[in-house]
């Protein structure tokens, strides 16, 4: 596909944007008492209320036309059948296979039934998790394992970390799971201070087993283990790996049976459902891990089969494009009103920005439109006392997704009712805003003079008409969290398909890696740096001076 600007629906949306310029969401609600009902839809334990958007029936009709014209139906079929939709790496994109239903027994990709591989890996995980929790697996001095440190970065870290944190209420007793990612030595140093080498297992998660940060941290962990009582022959009792590079993991000292496979058809940022999710399974048990997979599968089935007009990832993806490309929204905020889900925006940020931060169309031409937005956010209500000011009165349009459960995990006092009320009040305030007349009246009612009203009222005006979605679920469970993350995975794919880009490669990351190695070599040698730019030369000099 070429540029989406060539699509008829895109051109109609450009015109339609002008028609909508004077339409306020408040008037859309006033004109249609059924608006909330009409623009609410459900799937996999989630209700999406998308009524607070700058959209009417025509907008939504045109957005549906757009996804159809962009070939989403074919793209979905391609993904679910294992076609090589990652064209630049000539790979299938099959995170959906990692959570396929047990009722499906084959998914043939390039002559291999990938479901057999997935299921045998799940069995291997089951065994490993059971051995750790039952106490059958012991450390080198015969003590029970109390801590697992997962070492990985990017997709081999964020997804599992965020989900493990989100599932805190489901943690099994006995084993504490920690995560290390950063090459900054403070990360691993801090975690090693918490644990005992006799009772700690390290899981090294790296699809390639070649990532600088992960290997450096894995080596530091092994050195620490060896210098604190462990011997080389004990390494296999304390280190496991998740990787598609078995040879490198064996060379490190892992026993073959403690190496969990990965496949090139799973992208890093989509890999938490594979053995990369092992730390999650250890933290919450395989039963909950299976629930997580099942929730994601429910969303997959919804995405695959529901009409686009009722399809959550399609609606959210298309509305996102409406704001990014037709309203110049540069960012999109995710605000979970759930303490355990507070790190979710970071995972979706990685998922979306590594996927859709692209400037080249599938056919190799440059894009003519904006693509993936900056994804950001954080937990409500904390953000209300920080960045929400910009959401309400700043100059930028920031579409928001509010995510909130109906029931809390920790019902104390009025906390949950207050949390829920705050969530609703934010989406309401973003939509209704405050007019100058309202601000003036408020000041008048509180006894302000005319001069004071004239000076202060303009500052109290809140433009309103700012869009948001609300995602509601009964409770944050493994299944609903699985479905939620799958929803965002598919939303990303919908948008990538509309823009005509490949959401599944990440060539941009490579340049930083290559230059990082080059500069590291310069820091630790007497190389001639005169060909480098003056700024980089000076910074290298500063580092070397500090070491001398
Ligand atoms: O699992 P690996 O091979 O260590 O890679 C880690 C991460 O690095 C990235 O390539 C980005 O640098 C991610 O896509 C990936 O999840």
Image: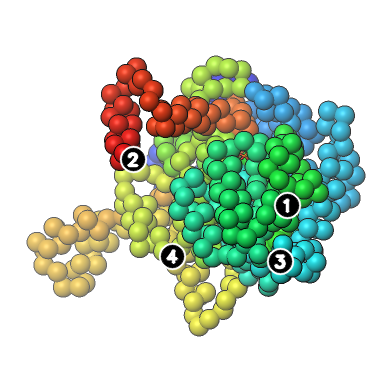
- Side of 27 relative to 260 (left or right): left
Whether 5 is drawn above or below 126: the answer is above
Position of the N terminus by quadrant: top right
The x and y percentages for residue 501 are: 59, 27
How crowded pointer 3 is (Cα within 10 Å; few <14, some 14-19, many 20+) is rated as few
The x and y percentages for residue 512 are: 47, 30
Nearer-N-terminus badge (2/3): 3
* Helix, strand or loop for disc 2: helix
Mark 1 or 4, which is nearer the eye?
Answer: 1
Nearer-N-terminus badge (2/4): 4
Q: Badge 2 is on which residue?
A: 547
Camera-nearest residue between 133 and 491: 133
How crowded pointer 1 is (Cα within 10 Å; few <14, some 14-19, many 20+) is rated as few
Q: Is mark 3 within 8 Å of ligand 1?
A: no
Q: Residue at x 51, y 63 (%)?
A: 193
Distance between the alpha carbons at the discs numbered 2 and 4: 44 Å
- Side of 35 relative to 230 (left or right): left
Q: Residue at x 40, y 60 (%)?
A: 383
* Helix, strand or loop for disc 3: loop
Q: Badge 3 is on which residue?
A: 141
Camera-nearest residue between 349 and 407: 349
Q: Residue at x 33, y 28 (%)?
A: 536
* Helix, strand or loop for disc 4: loop
Camera-nearest residue between 296 and 31: 296
Distance between the alpha carbons at the discs numbered 1 and 4: 50 Å
Nearer-N-terminus badge (1/4): 1
* Helix, strand or loop for disc 1: helix
Whether 292 is drawn above or below 112: the answer is below
Distance between the alpha carbons at the discs numbered 3 and 1: 12 Å
Q: Badge 4 is on which residue?
A: 381
Q: Badge 1 is on which residue?
A: 233
């Amino acid at each position: 596909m070429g540029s989406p600007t060539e699509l008829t629906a895109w051109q109609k949306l450009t015109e339609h944007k002008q028609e909508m310029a004077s339409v306020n969401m408040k008037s859309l609600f006033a004109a249609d008492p059924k608006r909330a009902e009409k623009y609410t839809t459900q799937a996999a334990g989630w209700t999406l209320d998308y009524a607070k958007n700058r959209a009417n029936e025509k907008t939504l009709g045109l957005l549906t036309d757009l996804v159809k014209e962009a070939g989403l139906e074919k793209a979905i079929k391609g993904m679910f059948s294992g076609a090589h939709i990652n064209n630049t790496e000539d790979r299938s994109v099959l995170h959906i296979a990692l959570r396929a239903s047990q009722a499906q027994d084959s998914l043939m990709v390039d002559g291999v039934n990938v479901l057999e591989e997935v299921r045998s890996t799940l069995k291997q995980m089951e065994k490993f998790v059971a051995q750790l929790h039952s106490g059958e697996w012991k450390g080198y001095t015969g003590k029970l394992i109390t801590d697992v440190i997962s070492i990985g970065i990017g997709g081999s870290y964020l997804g599992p970390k965020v989900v493990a944190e989100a599932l805190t209420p489901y943690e099994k007793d006995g084993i504490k799971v920690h995560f290390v990612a950063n090459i900054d030595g403070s990360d691993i140093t801090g975690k090693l201070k918490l644990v005992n080498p006799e009772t700690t297992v390290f899981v090294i998660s790296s699809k390639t087993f070649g990532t600088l940060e992960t290997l450096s941290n894995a080596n530091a962990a092994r050195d620490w283990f060896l210098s604190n009582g462990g011997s080389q022959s004990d390494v296999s009792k304390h280190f496991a790996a998740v990787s598609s590079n078995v040879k490198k993991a064996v060379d490190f000292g892992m026993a073959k049976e403690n190496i969990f496979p990965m496949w090139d058809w799973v992208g890093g940022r989509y890999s938490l459902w594979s053995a990369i999710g092992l730390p999650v399974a250890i933290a919450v048990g395989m039963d909950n891990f299976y629930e997580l997979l099942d929730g994601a599968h429910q969303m997959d089935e919804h995405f695959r089969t529901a009409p686009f007009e009722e399809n959550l990832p399609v609606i959210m993806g298309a509305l996102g494009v409406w704001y990014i490309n037709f309203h110049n929204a540069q960012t999109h905020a995710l605000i979970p009103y759930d303490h355990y889900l507070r790190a979710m925006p970071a995972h979706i940020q990685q998922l979306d920005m590594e996927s859709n931060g692209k400037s080249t169309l599938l056919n190799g031409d440059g894009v003519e439109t904006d693509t993936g937005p900056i994804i950001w956010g954080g937990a409500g209500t904390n953000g209300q006392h920080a960045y929400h000011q910009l959401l309400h009165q700043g100059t930028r349009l920031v579409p928001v997704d509010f995510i909130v459960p109906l029931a809390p995990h920790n019902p104390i006092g009025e906390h949950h009712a207050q949390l829920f009320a705050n969530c609703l009040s934010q989406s309401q305030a973003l939509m209704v805003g405050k007019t100058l007349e309202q601000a003036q009246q408020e000041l008048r009612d509180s006894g302000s003079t005319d001069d004071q009203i004239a000076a202060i009222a303009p500052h109290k005006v809140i433009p309103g008409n700012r869009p948001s979605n609300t995602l509601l679920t009964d409770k944050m469970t493994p299944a609903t969290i699985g479905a939620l993350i799958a929803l965002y995975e598919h939303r990303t794919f919908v948008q990538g398909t509309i823009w005509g880009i490949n959401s599944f490669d990440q060539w941009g990351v490579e340049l930083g890696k290559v230059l990082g190695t080059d500069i590291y070599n310069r820091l630790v040698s007497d190389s001639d740096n005169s060909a480098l730019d003056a700024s980089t030369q000076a910074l290298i000099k500063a580092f070397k001076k500090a070491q001398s």
